[in-house]
Image (tube, rainbow, N blue to C red):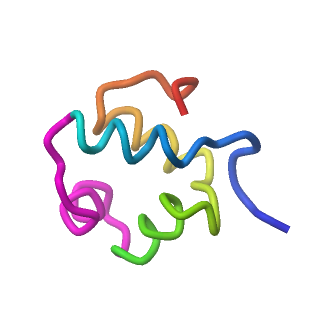
Amino acid sequence: MRVGIPGFQAARLREAREARGINSLVSLAELLGVSTSTVSRWESEESTPPPDMLAKLAEVLKLRPSYF
């Protein structure tokens, strides 16, 4: 069972990261204060971010949480 946000769209995370000029998972992970493997799992749909991380993702990427 996946834990996190139901309906989270990993492709949108990748798209938003690249559109904001954050070209590596390492860079996004550092901005969020999580491991690179965590961001990798979100982008590969192995897991989804918990609600607090979704809010932080939205803040860092300057988007609404509902975008994801």
Q: Residue furthest right?
A: 1
Please say whether residue 24 is one of the residues in the magenta stretch: yes
- Answer left or right for 1 relative to 19: right
Q: Residue at x 63, y 68 (%)?
A: 46
- Answer left or right for 36 relative to 21: right
Whether residue 20 is situated above or below residue 26 in the rendered picture: above
Residue 51 in picture, x, y percent from top left: 61, 45
Residue 54 in picture, x, y percent from top left: 52, 43
Q: Residue at x 37, y 68 (%)?
A: 34
Please give the range of residues in magenta. 20-35
Please say whether residue 54 is one of the residues in the magenta stretch: no
Q: Residue at x 19, y 35 (%)?
A: 20
Q: Residue at x 46, y 71 (%)?
A: 38
Q: Quadrant of the N terminus?
A: bottom right
Give the image quarter of residue 18.
top left
**Disc count in the image?**
0
Q: Quadrant of the C terminus?
A: top right
Whether residue 56 is situated above or below residue 36 in the rendered picture: above
Residue 16 in picture, x, y percent from top left: 34, 36
